[in-house]
Amino acid sequence: MSDTPHTAPRGRIDWADPALSERLRLRKRRQFWLKALGLGAVGVAALMLFVLIASLVVTGYQAFRQTHATIEVNIDPFQVDPANIRGGNFDDIIETAILAYFPDVEAPGEQREIVRILSDGAEFQLRDRVLDNPELIGERVSITVPLSDPYDLLNKGLIDRTTPEENRRLKDDQIARFDTLAEAGIISQPLNTALITNADSRFPELAGLKGALVGSFYALATCFLLAFPVGIGAAIYLEEFAPKNRLSDLIEININNLAAVPSVVFGLLALAVFIGWFGLPRSAPFVGGMTLALMTLPTIIIATRAALKAVPGSIREAALGVGASRQQVVFQHVLPLAMPGILTGTIIGLAQALGETAPLLLIGMNAFITSAPETPFDSATALPTQIFIWADSPERGFVSRTSAAILVLLTFLVTMNALAIFLRSRFERRW
Amino acid sequence: MNDMRMTERARLMQDIKISARDVNVYYGATRAINDVSIDIRDKTVTAFIGPSGCGKSTFLRCFNRMNDTIESARVTGTIELDGRDIHAPDLDPVQLRARVGMVFQKPNPFPKSIYDNVAYGPKIHGLAASKADLDDIVERALRRAALWDESKDRLTASGTSLSGGQQQRLCIARAIATEPEVLLMDEPASALDPIATAQIEELIDELKENYCVVIVTHSMQQAARVSQRTAFFHLGDLVEYGDTGQIFTNPKNERTESYITGRIG
Amino acid sequence: MTLFAFVLLFTATVLAYLLNLRAARALRAGGARLHSLGGFHGGFAALVTLLPALVFLLAWLLLKEPAITVLLLRTLPEAEIAGLGTGERQLIISEIRTIAGGRIFGSPAEWKIEAADRLLAMRRTADYLMIALTALLAGGSMVIARRRVTPDFRARQGTEGILHGLMAFCATVAIFVTLGIVASLLFETIRFFQMVPVTDFLFGTNWEPQIPIREDQIAAEGAFGWIPVFLGTLVITVVALFIAVPVGLMSAVYLHEFASRRFRAAAKPVLEILAGVPTVVYGFFAILVVAPALRALGDMLAIPIAPNTALAAGGVMGIMLIPFISSFADDALGAVPRSLRDGALALGATPAETMTRVLFPAAIPGIVGGVLLAVSRAIGETMIVVMAAGLMAKMTLNPLDSVTTVTVQIVTLLIGDTAFDNPKTLAAFALGMMLFIVTLLINILALRIVRRYREIYD
């Protein structure tokens, strides 16, 4: 072989050769399979998202409605003293009203069962109404109160009447009593506004997200007020002023690593430092916000630096050229131009913070609190921790409420991200 | 009419390898090539010259359908290789590219060994019957690319460890290892120093013995040195096409003359 | 009161700004040539007034309660608190605080009610003191700043100097956070190792953190060997990677090389939404859908699957990591120069061959970096496992079994119990320390690989 001149071409290749065509066919088939596999992978991801959303919607949509009963109550002045409305005997009033639908029932045990059809919150609802309007005392008014959880589930079809009685949460006689009320036409299923206007409760039919929403708002506001200025300050310094030395490198590495520290570690930090050493209150949205700020800081710094970097050097040179100081250049020219990018990054960072759960658990924002916090220093829950609490609750009614709460949370996240995308597309400049 | 008969005769007298008719290339809405028709001879070096942005590279990439790999690009018109339409449905772009090799502006060896770089084409197309056969193919290609002597002792070294000029010769070896019929070169020496450029030009001259070589260059001296035929492109038009000597000494078109004498470009 | 202090401070700041601005304008109106614009004089005054008082105010707020507590402890009757441990003292303090807050349960001892009154008095004094000192500090700074208004004063340099320092401080906050993490973890971990030997923790194969019922029972009952906990973390991580790596990589390959632009535009948001779903939602998904489905599957195939099987938590974590891996792989593939792709295609390689033989191998370092970051995410992920994984630590590698993880243990040990003096609580910090170290090492390695890889092609 070494005798042949090795610089000559080997001669034309006959591409029509069946062996080569067969090979090409095989190669094409391999390509087809790779593509199919890839498409399958994308399909798996999309399917998972679909199943996730669908399961939440299927279990959660029921919680946006709540079964109520409209009953006629007689606010007897003998039972409610206008001078001491709070001490009024509202449970008796409600009891009388509901028992009116069952004139034949006299056994006290059965009567108690009937009263349990209504939620425990009914008497407080009546009390609040009378407190608002004391003239109602002595009147006969109609009031719409929530049913308790099992009957709510029954009305929504979540308790199957065909399952054998011993496996059913409501027995035949309980269902019969509910049907009596339904036939009387007092059962309705209006929009469940309590989901937004009530705070947490042991009873699913009364539990709402108000406390969690307010808590999350306070925490996010704290997070924003701390992380936004500090993050922008740090980013401007690192991008525009920092000398290139080991300290700057160290800070840079530090920020990148901080962005990847597990969130639960931030919770440990907050627990040990904010609560343990500084004695700040547990479960307070303010402390939660401080913790979230530490986690959001790297995101904001990284986004701000990217936005600053995107402003072309010619702008800086132009401003320097007319005699502006370096800080004037940054604050009057570069920063305004970078602002849309900074805001986009900040909103995305805040959206992440809104969904963050683990660090808030460690600082006790999973407490059971039945009123919305009045200040950022009061005990409260946040949306994600409320979801965690409800997901952990044994009552059936909390399953759909957890899904509903998740849908509320996801709505906020989608809105925030849509806002970020809008900002980016509306104000982004291409240089 | 007269024009038509001229090309007919040219096809008979000369061996026409590639024949393009009314080729347009669009990038999205903008048209980069306007109605270009050209016949390219076999065993000849044809140079495409013109100012940057005139579309000469875009046009070159039509010949091996590399424009297909750019999502926004669209090609119309017919291009024939040996009288067969390269856009014909039964002609696979994969096979077409094995027959029409290409060397790029920047040397782009794969981050693999020198041997694997050259063996890559023959391997995927199944051109080697055995390991010894593959060795033979690699050796021939490297010899023809004038890289054998420098690389025979370190075939397992990474292709990226070579110098710029060597890398470009490696890319030429890689392209000719599949025994292509046409070799497209997109400014193959623009990223190289003068000595490496001279080596590449020498190589191109030798390659024309066996191949139809089409080279895009923005250096008129290079076109004059290596090519027998020259086509001048300007703003997406083929302005003038003829023997290299004639184009450089006696251009017929005013625009060509302006470019040759340095008034545009 | 606090709010009032802040309002006071910000009023003073605005006042200082206006004062110096007017002073500077007056000078100029009087014919003097000022070095700096009036705005800079005002800004200088505002910063000088605001900063010292603000630092004081924040420090006061942070240190007020601890200081009051110390003072309060001293006033308590010696006879009542003699010989009590820190835990019991804390209990007494919090009871006194509750009484001071107006919520009285049962009938507390007389001395506690007196202490509560003292606590309230102390707090009141502290508040007045805070307001007075803030006012003094802000006012003093204001006067000093006002004196500086002269034609020669370089107010611009002064203002910019302060701002420069402020920004530099902001930049170092990141370092302080890291130091804070290390310090807090280290401090509590050392206290833990004073109660439980280091070797027991690092090499022990038994994890049973018991609640000590009496002080003298500490560490006698519990076993604190972290190996089974870490093993459980690994099992779940491996399960997660089994799902996330193939699906993530293949979808990145498809979207990067084969998908049409319109398909990509539709598929990217799907991945972005998956990436944006909070982990608590994934956790609920695991217990609502995945775990029951797996159990049903197990019943059908007659395979015993534990109710809290690692498959459920790991699988859902895998779904969570799909977009993570896919975006890293996409970046890595995008960083491979286009010329390599062109080179392969020009040789007649099919797009699939270009991908598998050229692009993918060239992108492997970047992809490995991304997968490592995903591993660190999986190890540190908390909510999914807290909701869907088990609580019992077992020495098992069986993904069908129920396992626990480091993060689950941290959360369970710390929920509802914050006395910092028993090994059960402190063990959480020791686990946190290990978690921090392990993820930090992986992150550093991954970031280094990714960065070095980018440098090759830049």
Image: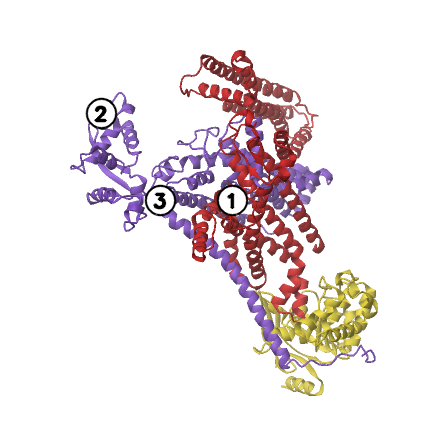
Chain colours: A purple, B yellow, C red
Q: Tell me the kind of residue under disc 3.
A: Phe
Please tell me whether residue A419 is drawn above or below residue B255 in the rendered image. Answer: above
Nearer to me, C90 or C217: C217
- Residue nearest the viewer, comparing B263 with C213: C213
Q: Disc 1 is attached to a residue of which chain? A: C
Residue under disc 3 on the same chain as residue under disc 2: yes
How many numbered discs, if any?
A: 3
Which amino acid type is shown beneath numbered disc 1?
Answer: Val
Mark 1 lies on a secondary structure that is helix
Q: Are marks 3 and 1 on the same chain?
A: no
CA gap, disc 3 and disc 1: 28 Å
Disc 1 to disc 2, C-alpha distance: 52 Å
Percent x, y for residue B59?
Answer: 65, 71
The tag on residue A79 is 2
Q: Name the one closer to the observer, C277 or C114.
A: C114
Q: Which quadrant of the view contains residue B52?
A: bottom right
**Label 1 belongs to which residue?**
C385
